[in-house]
Amino acid sequence: QQQVKQSPQSLIVQKGGISIINCAYENTAFDYFPWYQQFPGKGPALLIAIRPDVSEKKEGRFTISFNKSAKQFSLHIMDSQPGDSATYFCAAGSGAGSYQLTFGKGTKLSVIP
Amino acid sequence: NAGVTQTPKFQVLKTGQSMTLQCAQDMNHEYMSWYRQDPGMGLRLIHYSVGAGITDQGEVPNGYNVSRSTTEDFPLRLLSAAPSQTSVYFCASSAGVRNIQYFGAGTRLSVL
């Protein structure tokens, strides 16, 4: 069974701090690694994504770091804000034309003032 | 632009009852999928479809049926509901290669 392992399960960060969520995968065929953000009562929404030809991608306060040899990737949220409080899911997909994503189990982030 | 629309938002069933969760998208996406979300379990794929008339099983298909007669609609059927099917169900669609999946707002189902 393909797996994506995500940690931590929950995270509490003070406003202005850095939030870091880690994921590890097993299947070397994965070539697309998105992060989804989910607010209570809503469906997940794409936050940022990376492909393995780069080691880092930054969009505003959100950065994905990717380590192909270790089969790990992480999400960094700089200057975390209370509005960032949500559940974050990492995911992995493989191959052009393959639509499926395998999701991690999620991290509930709470940013406290 | 409505995106992915799921109905109903909430549903309570008794064990053994049947029902259909509706999902419709207006983005002309080829790929549609159903997930269930349970506490601590993340999103698990139930069934998916890569186009009208084509469906396949995901990770947790037992107890669920799907069909895809049009590009827009992808209903999920529970033939005989069980308490283990109490969950939040999400439908998603994707245009393809970039694998960006757009999710609906979910259906919260309780089976008593």
Image (cartoon, rainbow, N blue to C red):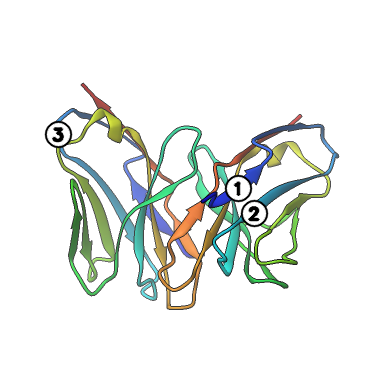
| Residue located 42% across and 36% down the image | A39
Name the residue furthest bottom.
Answer: A96
Position above or below: B82 against A12: below
Judge left or right: residue A70 versus residue B35.
left
Dot 3 corresponds to which residue? A17
Res. A80 mark: none
Nearer the observer, A10 or B76: B76
Q: Which mark is residue B5?
A: 1
Left or right: residue B30 versus residue A86 is right
Which chain contains the residue that carries disc 3? A
Check whether the beta carbons of the residues at disc 2 and disc 1 lie within 8 A of each other: yes
Same chain for mark 2 and mark 1? The answer is yes
Indicate the position of residue B35 as horizontal and vertical percent values.
58, 52
Q: Amino acid at mark 3?
A: Gly
Secondary structure under the numbered disc 2 in the rendered image: strand
Q: Nearer the viewer, mark 3 or mark 1?
A: 1
Above or below, comparing residue A66 to residue B1 in the picture: below
